[in-house]
Amino acid sequence: MKPLVSLPLVARLLQGPARRLLADRRRRGVFAMLTAPWFEQAFAELMELAHPAFTPAGPARQGQACLVIGTLGPGGAERQLANTAIGLARDERWHPAVATANPAEGTSSFHLAAIEAAGVSVRHIPLGPPRLAEPMLAAVLQKLSRFDVIGFSYPAYHILRYACFFAEQRPELVHTWMDEMNVFAGLGAVLAGVPRLVLNGRSVAPHNFGIFQPYMRQGYRCLLQARPDVTFTNNSAAGAADYARWLGLPRQRIQVHRNGFDFPAEIGRTEPAQALRASLGIPATARVLGGLLRFTEEKQPALWVRTALRVVERDPAAWAVVFGDGPLREPLRAMLATAPGGERVLLPGLTEDAFTALRAMDVLMLTSRLEGLPNVLVEAQAMGVPVIATGGGGMRETYVEGVTGLTAARPTVAHLAALAGGLLGDAARRQDMSRRAASHARAEFSRDAMIARTRSIFDKAAQA
């Protein structure tokens, strides 16, 4: 699409307001709408200018599947990538390797040991590959600098960065995870001539979240236009439908590929779970409302904490604990320090053993504004913990309403607290739901079933 007015004019108009427009998700959405024609043109020029620089150095390495993600931190997508790499480690057809955008250090190495223990290599994609300094690619970046006003220098650099990596590695298939990797590594794989490409979308389309960036929609469209044979997956029907709406695609264009888990054999309150409760100061006889989440806007941790305060206020035997970390954790800890009942609502931070943390709970609550297929709801049920959720997006695809989980009629403190308090106080119902939850999760979300589906997706991509 040809822009209606010149880029220099847009530059003069946007240089000041652009910073304000990009201050939050909604403003980024406005900016993306206003600049869509220029992003479309920028992506098209990038692919045209850079393509001649990536003549394949040799044939693809048959069976090599490169799984690409930002980090190996303690997130849901990261856990599924780890499960996929581990599950494919001894596959006869596909040989997985993991590549990360950021070094596997600190919390970004959460899943590193498990992946490497399975014999799967993990590589950091170099931030500044020497090839980017070569005249041909340096000239491409220079020509694209006229799009700097809309922030295109960032995606342009990283797309070429990933193209350099894939051109060196020459995998037969690249499987990308999350939106930034889908766009950057996906287009990089196209430039490098990778034969097969599988995208794994976020829970729902990125414009619903704070991670949304103005280039994303046009980047996806450029990728799908350049490679119509790309396989696009999502872990829930709700997420697949949302991506299809956002990108203007037929719903059937995006396959539903549900998450899979390697569940521990033990169900219920184990000795490590009892020890964890004791270490947190929770009495052995307490009824515990639990959570496990990132303390970020879309998870609505403030709603979780306010609901927990209401529950412990009404029930002297109730305690609440939510594991996880993020930018909103410390403000909530400060609030709890002065709140009535706050001493029975605990925010202990990250846990390295999610299943033990889940077993320490009697009921799990998820207060997210929107989700695709949330891992924690599946994992809690597998441990025999019934769940309560706000129900947005694909949450209800993980549990059986009234049998293994409950959905709040409205995402409010009053509705959530009524459900949580009622279930904590009804031991017979809670025990029945616990038994049914474990059976449901283990039947529907096993890692073996997920790996079989992954293998089938890869095989079909190879035959396309």
Image (cartoon, rainbow, N blue to C red):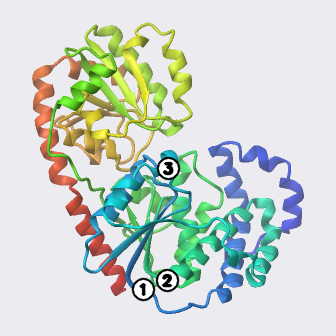
| Relative image position of residue 357 (x, y in whole percent) | 30, 33
Look at mark 2 in the image and give the residue it sits on. 170
Q: Nearer the viewer, residue 97 or 448?
A: 97
Indicate left or right for 22 with 261 as reference: right
Dot 3, crowdedness within 10 Å: few (<14), some or many (≥20)? Answer: some
Earlier along the polypeptide chain: callout 1 or callout 2? 1
Distance between mark 3 and mark 2 Cα atoms: 26 Å
Give the vertical position of 373 relative to 308 (above or below): below
Distance between mark 1 and mark 3 Cα atoms: 28 Å
| Relative image position of residue 286 (x, y in whole percent) | 23, 15
Look at mark 1 in the image and give the residue it sits on. 61
Distance between mark 1 and mark 2 Cα atoms: 6 Å
Earlier along the polypeptide chain: callout 1 or callout 3? 1
The N terminus: image quadrant = bottom right
Could you tell me the amino acid type at mark 2? Answer: Arg
| Relative image position of residue 13 (x, y in whole percent) | 87, 55
Q: Residue at x 62, y 86 (%)?
A: 54
Indicate left or right for 217 with 92 as reference: right
Q: Quadrant of residue 233?
A: bottom left
Q: Quadrant of residue 64?
A: bottom left
Q: Are marks 1 and 2 in contact (CB under 8 Å)?
A: yes
Look at mark 3 in the image and give the residue it sits on. 108
| Relative image position of residue 322 (x, y in whole percent) | 38, 28
Could you tell me the amino acid type at mark 3? Answer: Ser
